[in-house]
Image (cartoon, helix red, strand yellow):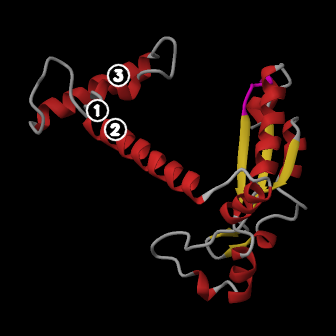
Amino acid sequence: MNFAGVWKAPCIFMCENNHWAISVPQEMQTASQSFAAKAVAYGMPGIRVDGNDVLAVYEACREARERAENGGGPTLVETVTFRMGPHSSSDDPSKYQAKELFEAWQEKDPIDRYRAWLKGKRLWTQKWEDELKEEMLAEIAAAVEAAESTPAPVVETLFDDVYAEVPPMLLEQRAALLEQIRRSGDIEDTGGAFPL
């Protein structure tokens, strides 16, 4: 973020503030009033927005994008929301979160809120949602199929696309890795190209 602020990089940093870092609440992680306030130290605007309000998030990102496109540099957008499930498969939030807290945030579900807004504007029907859901599931299935059928990259690409000219140290590391792969015999020599 500091680098982006110094160079006025045209980017948007999104911070999903879900109030918890596994079992540690936000107030035990920072003394700042918000995470968006930290943007000042990096020389960029910080916007704090209701992360469960689709339109508010859209507007904050639209403004940030416009700023970036017009040479105004980066923006930090903090979306305030709540993690409705465990942090990982080994986490049990019922051990450190009050049931009432979960229930209160459940009432703020962003999909339900946006659906209600669309209904109020007469822009939503169940038929439209069902068609959209079917279309999105088909798009996801096609993307998964494309990803799974894409060949694995060759090991040499591990060293590509970082520097315009690969420094000698990385050339040495690449040569050492390829030699180790050749010696291991796990992957047959394919003329210098080994899948990862």
- Residue 100 as seen in the image, left or right of residue 27: left
In this view, 65 is above or below 35:
above
Numbered range of the magenta stretch = 7-11
Q: Whole-percent x and y of residue 119? A: 73, 59
Q: Whole-percent x and y of residue 185? A: 9, 36
Residue at the image point whose x is 74% and y is 30% from the top: 3
- Which label sits on residue 3? none
- Residue 93 as seen in the image, left or right of residue 183: right
Q: Quadrant of residue 97?
A: bottom right
Q: Quadrant of the N terminus?
A: top right
Find disc 1 in the rendering and name its residue: 150
Q: Which of disc 2 and disc 3 is earlier in sequence?
A: 2
Q: Estimate how packed mark 2 is, as few (under 14), some (14 to 19) or many (20 or more) residues with alpha carbons within 10 Å.
A: few
**Camera-side residue: 40 or 181?**
40
Asked if the residue under mark 1 is in contact with the one under mark 2, i.e. CB atoms within 8 Å, the reply is yes
Q: Secondary structure at mark 1?
A: loop
Find disc 2 in the rendering and name its residue: 147
Q: Nearer the viewer, mark 3 or mark 2?
A: 2
- Which label sits on residue 172? 3
- Residue 40 as seen in the image, left or right of residue 163: right
Q: CA distance from mark 2 to mark 1?
A: 5 Å
